[in-house]
């Protein structure tokens, strides 16, 4: 079968990465996946792709994968992505999100990769926002080691572009949610609330619940990656909805879908998390013709449905 091209997706057994792998395969790409299965899941792996059980900090293993697979394009989604873990163990966060990232970039340069698409975070690189929504030129003062590491990686990508000619696209995601999101960590509030309610366990709201986030559905994020395939050079885009939603509203929306009648527990405010976060996505709309298509209500419905099916299996 004629293929569109060879691509590699790091973190392809994870939540966003696995949806991206599915779409790339549908679009006719030959897809390799690198994942150490630390938070990813074998069940997410699409059998039509080739899987390399490999850690991005393991340089020889990574070199082997790139030599064998010879990707033209790399989508980098593998990361330590728990903000609270980055606060409690900044060195570990940096070992994956900065040093692992650099190992991958060095391998990409050696292997002649043409382009890298990087999963960054609009929720963490800006820090406490000065303007709402934040566009790509907003000042960047991350409040967590996770945000610092992602910002460092963005700067390295600029260096690799200027000095080594590697094309790259930085996609600064808002809060992504949808089917397959891991509910075991503390990261995805929709997944955590949904799974707890479906198992009749009380969800906990940290702080007063008035914190806001910009929730974007995973299929829209995949579409942004596909749209970004067209670019050459170095680009940075926010990927969100521009809509600010409080954690209490998320709780209410998920409760409605689940049919949960209980009350939330109360937890302490978390360090390293800003109060309000919402992204201006005008630039990606103007330059790549991308805009979100799935409403919060539709997205929550589809997500709760998939969690319910998974728990029933
Ligand atoms: N989910 C969000 O809301 C969100 C928001 C902004 C940015 N991001 C970024 O998107 C990417 C994917 O996030 P996700 O939500 O799908 O999380 P995820 O935990 O489901 O995916 C991360 C994947 O990377 C793998 N991984 C972790 N460390 C690795 C290592 N050292 N070597 C190889 N594989 C490793 C994990 O096993 C997992 O499959 C991450 O880079 C994350 O920082 C996510």
Image (cartoon, rainbow, N blue to C red):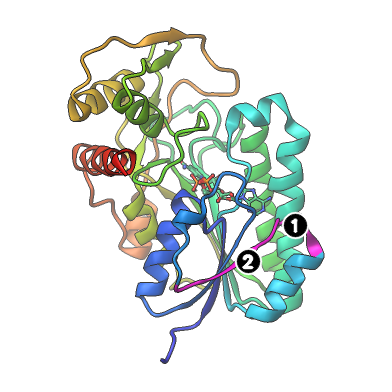
Camera-nearest residue between 230 and 256: 256
Query: Can you tell which quarter of the image residue 264 is in?
Result: top left
Q: Which residue is mark 2?
A: 52
Q: Residue at x 78, y 35 (%)?
A: 91
Q: 153 left or right of 135?
A: right
Residue 219 colored magenta? no
Vertical side of 104 occupied by 127: above or below: above
Query: Can you tell which quarter of the image residue 311 is in?
Result: top left
Q: Earlier in the sequence, mark 1 or mark 2?
A: 2
Q: 272 left or right of 191?
A: right
Asked if one can make out residue 78 in the rendered structure from this viewpoint, the answer is yes
Residue 269 x/y as whole percent: 51, 12
Asked if one can make out residue 237 in the rendered structure from this viewpoint, the answer is no
Residue 187 x/y as whole percent: 49, 32
Q: Which residues are magenta?
A: 48-59
Badge 1 crowding class, 10 Å Cα cut-off, few under 14, some 14 to 19, many 20 or more, is: some
Please, what secondary structure does the residue beneath circle 2 have?
strand
Residue 102 has which mark? 1
Residue 82 x/y as whole percent: 58, 34
Instruction: Work out which residue is located at the far front of the displayed protein and give it.
Output: 313
């Amino acid at each position: 079968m004629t293929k569109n091209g060879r691509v590699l997706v790091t973190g392809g057994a994870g939540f966003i990465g696995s949806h991206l792998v599915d779409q790339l395969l549908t679009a006719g790409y030959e897809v390799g996946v690198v994942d150490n299965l630390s938070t990813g899941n074998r069940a997410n792996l699409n059998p039509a792709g080739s899987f390399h059980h490999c850690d991005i900090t393991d340089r020889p293993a990574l070199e082997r994968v790139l030599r064998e697979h010879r990707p033209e394009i790399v989508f980098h989604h593998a990361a330590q992505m728990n903000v609270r873990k980055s606060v409690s163990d900044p060195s570990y966060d940096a070992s994956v999100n900065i040093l692992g990232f650099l190992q991958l970039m060095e391998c990409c340069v050696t292997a002649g990769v043409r382009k890298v698409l990087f999963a960054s975070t609009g929720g963490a690189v800006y820090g406490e926002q000065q303007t709402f929504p934040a566009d790509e030129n907003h000042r960047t003062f991350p409040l967590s080691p996770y945000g610092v590491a992602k910002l460092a990686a963005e700067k390295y990508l600029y260096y690799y572009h200027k000095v080594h000619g590697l094309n790259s696209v930085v996609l600064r995601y808002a809060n992504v949610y949808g089917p397959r999101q891991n509910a075991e960590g503390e990261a995805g509030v929709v997944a955590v609330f949904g799974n707890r309610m479906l198992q009749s366990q009380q969800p906990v709201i940290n702080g007063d619940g008035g914190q806001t986030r910009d929730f974007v559905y995973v299929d829209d994020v995949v579409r942004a990656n596909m749209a970004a395939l067209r670019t050459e050079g170095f680009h940075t885009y926010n990927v969100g909805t521009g809509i600010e939603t409080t954690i209490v509203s998320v709780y209410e929306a998920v409760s409605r879908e689940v049919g949960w009648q209980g009350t939330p527990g109360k937890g302490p405010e978390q360090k390293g998390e800003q109060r309000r976060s919402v992204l201006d996505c005008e630039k990606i709309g103007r330059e790549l013709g991308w805009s979100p298509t799935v409403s919060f209500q539709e997205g929550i419905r589809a997500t709760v449905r998939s969690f319910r099916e998974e728990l029933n299996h």
